[in-house]
Amino acid sequence: MVKIATLERIEILDKAEALAKMIVESDVADEYRRAFWRLKQDRRAQQLIARFVKLKERYEEVQRFGKYHPDYRDVMKEVREAKRELDLHETVAAFKEAEKAMQELLDEISVLIGKAVSEHVKVPTGNPYFLSAGCSGGCGAGGSCGCRT
């Protein structure tokens, strides 16, 4: 019995490796890697990212005191402007789109595998609004999906 379970486990892992290889060789993964490379090579995008990271650190410092911090309004405005500029930059937007497509593919695969096991299995996905297999993230205590702890 132990040998059968071990062989079955090895076969499952082999098939998982084959699936992973298919994902890595997919057009979605190729586009993700190209977009990531372009993002890393884009000097202006890297400047915008560095600026946003620096402002985000300042934002977190200001958040400790909330609206009572003397720089609260200025920092909030700067962060919003930097985020908008970052999001609208062509290379950054292209990378985010490719990243989203990659995450959606991985989510779909996770849900398919989860549903193959059971309609009630919880499947973690990168998107809280993704229709998961039977249950969404917070139903562990029992809820509309019928889960029970």
Image (spheres, helix red, strand yellow):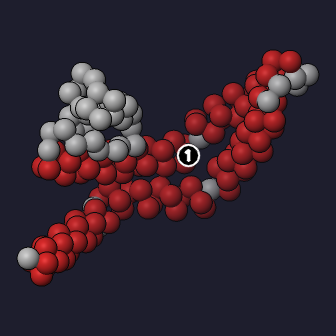
Decide: is 30 above or below 130: below
- Placement of the N terminus among the 4 image quadrants: bottom left
Name the residue carrying label 1: 92
Q: Nearer the viewer, residue 145 or 47?
A: 145
Question: On the picture, is 14 further left or further right than 64?
Answer: left
Q: Is residue 73 visible?
A: no
Q: How many marks?
A: 1
Q: Position of residue 91 (x, y in %)?
A: 54, 48
User: Dot 1: what SS?
Assistant: helix
Q: Which of 130 and 21 is in front in this view?
A: 130
- Placement of the C terminus among the 4 image quadrants: top left
Decide: is 60 above or below 43: above
Q: Residues within 10 Å of mark 1 (few under 14, many from 20)?
A: many
Q: Residue at x 27, y 42 (%)?
A: 122
Q: Which amino acid does label 1 sit on?
A: Val
Q: Nearer the viewer, residue 98 or 53?
A: 53
Q: Tell me the quarter of the picture where residue 55 sits.
A: top right
Q: Can residue 65 be seen in this view?
A: yes
Question: On the picture, is 71 further left or further right than 115?
Answer: right
Decide: is 4 above or below 109: below
Question: On the picture, is 81 further left or further right than 139?
Answer: right
Q: Where is residue 37 in the image (x, y as percent from the top left)?
A: 52, 62
Q: Where is residue 19 in the image (x, y as percent from the top left)?
A: 22, 65
Q: Residue furthest right?
A: 70
Q: Tell me the quarter of the picture where residue 4 sits.
A: bottom left
Q: Which residue is drawn at 70% across and 34% down?
A: 82
Decide: is 12 above or below 62: below
Q: Which residue is drawn at 28% across and 66% down?
A: 20
Q: Which residue is drawn at 35% across and 59% down?
A: 29
Q: Where is residue 73 in the image (x, y as percent from the top left)?
A: 81, 20
